[in-house]
Image (cartoon, rainbow, N blue to C red):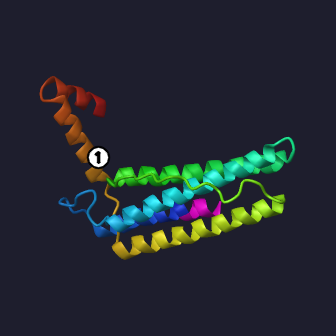
Amino acid sequence: MARFSLLSAILLHLVVVSMQQGDDETLDIQQRFGSSSVSMINDQIQREFNAMYLYESMASYFGRPSVGLPGFKKFLKKAANKERERAHKLIDYLNMRGGHVRLKPITPPSKFEWFSALDAAETALGAEKNITQELYRLRDRADMESDPHVTSIRDLRELIARLNKAGSGLGELIVDKELN
């Protein structure tokens, strides 16, 4: 739950920084959105998916009839879903900013069986600590670059692309009707 709040705070911070930048009509959607930021976000997406994969593996282990700990299975399935949701929030953010999502291979867990539920929980805690530390680094990077979030420019670019595809005349009227 704390990491969800941290991710939300980072995305909110990016919005606030952009509002402090002011409205500059000449800004491109990717201006001041450096390639290192895009790379760091792509790396974070991979970490989120790796954690999801780890939790899915753990859930599968605890769901085995020979292990028979359905409560741990349920807990870890829920954790896996949260990781997937966070990765998708970052993907949506990169797409909104005009960045390029570069999905990397998911790294398999280092093990697929645990000595106990405690062993699995300690492994999960280590993964969570690593991900949270990297989220803080991502936030610090956003501070350093004064990374803006320019929604209005993206919206206008999408509108222009739609108008170019639709053409003048009837196409403009159809786009206009969609805007109402």
Indicate left or right for 53 with 15 as reference: right
Around disc 1, counting alpha carbons within 10 Å, would you say few (fewer than 14), some (14 to 19), or many (20 or more)? few
In this picture, residue 51 sits left or right of residue 105:
right
For label 1, the SS is: helix
Most extreme residue toward the left, as rendered? 168
Image quadrant assignment for residue 118: bottom right
Q: What residue is at 79 percent from the left and 44 percent from the top?
A: 63
Image spot of residue 124 (x, y percent): 70, 62
Q: 147 left or right of 107?
A: left
Q: Mark 1 sits on what residue?
A: 155
Please give the range of residues in magenta.
Answer: 1-6
Is 153 placed left or right of 97 in the picture? left
Q: Is residue 3 magenta?
A: yes
Residue 146 in magenta stretch? no
Q: Is residue 180 visible?
A: no
Q: Would you identify the image quadrant in which residue 93 lies?
A: bottom left
Quadrant where the C terminus lies?
A: top left
Residue 53 percent location from the top left of the image: 62, 51
